[in-house]
Amino acid sequence: MKKIILITTAVALLFACKKEGINSTNENPLKASDGHVCTAHNFNGEIAFPGEEGQAMELTRKDGSTFNYEKYGDVNIIEGDIALSEDQLDIIANSSEKANSSEGAGLSWWDRVIRGRKWSNKTLYYRISSGVSSSIRTKIYQAVNEINSNTSVTIRYRTNQSNYVNIIPSSGCWSYVGKQGGSQDMGLATWCSKGNVIHEFLHAFGVYHEQSRGDRDNHITVNYGNIQSGKSGNFAKKGSRWSSFNLNSIMMYGSYAFSSNGQPTITRKNGTTFSTQRSYISYSDKATLNGIY
């Protein structure tokens, strides 16, 4: 049985720092600027509802372990921008941290969350709601072309398909992970870049964040002492991928994600930091899509 406990109210910001004086929805509100901490690595990543307050929730699993997420209205968010349906939360509640034979040998709990949620014929259909601005529409079309031209999957505009992604205006960037069945929302703010849109489409295809890979500790160090209170669950490992670890994955967050003090939460094994890459689909992203589909 799923048990959800209201813990606290939290502001969904990935940093302890943010650029001052940003009022335009055309600019990423989480970018750093000269004179502020985090200046070395501007954040170009994704977050669902920047500056908005969400309910921090705790789900108790059948093995007694807990799973944390944030609730914004009827949208359940993990890792800043991944939305989970109530059905997916039920799967998490009824699975153990590690797979056993009764739950599916060799499958991590995350594999079970996205199992059976692939898009038929490797094709995702989408529509754009009327409130989405022309500037973000251009980025959507660019992102779709980039994915169609460089990967083994296909994105097409919906005609009468019953399963599709419905892109809606939002204050941030977010998407459900995997096919949900019927219409599923993807929220995009005007400030979201083409790379942010690609990132969200890959979530819709079932891809999770690179820093959540099961083998990540061989390549990076997660500095839990620098992570915002209540956000350590965003760094939970979720299983394997279909290629070697890649800091240049478009699904990889930068060194300062969820920082509480302006110090890096993720570094290379040698302690150096790195920037967020949102310019292209990397070889590892392509391999992951090939592995899923």
Image (cartoon, grey):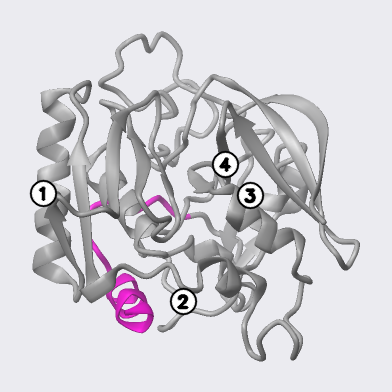
Point out the frontmost of discs 3 and 1: 1
Labels 3 and 4 touching (C-beta < 8 A): no
Which contiguous range is marked in magenta? 274-293
Tell me the distance, in whole angstroms, between the alpha carbons under discs 3 and 2: 18 Å
Judge whether residue 214 is colored magenta: no
Residue hosting label 1: 159
Residue hosting label 3: 265
Q: Earlier in the sequence, mark 1 or mark 4?
A: 4
Labels 2 and 4 touching (C-beta < 8 A): no
Task: Name the side, left or right, on which 17 lies relative to 91.
Answer: left
Q: Earlier in the sequence, mark 3 or mark 1?
A: 1
Tell me the distance, in whole angstroms, between the alpha carbons under discs 3 and 4: 20 Å
| Amino acid type, callout 1 | Thr
Point out the frontmost of discs 2 and 4: 4
Point out the frontmost of discs 3 and 4: 4
Of residues 88 and 281, the one nearer the viewer is 88
Q: Earlier in the sequence, mark 2 or mark 4?
A: 4
Residue hosting label 2: 245
156 to 80, vertically: above or below: below
| Amino acid type, callout 3 | Thr
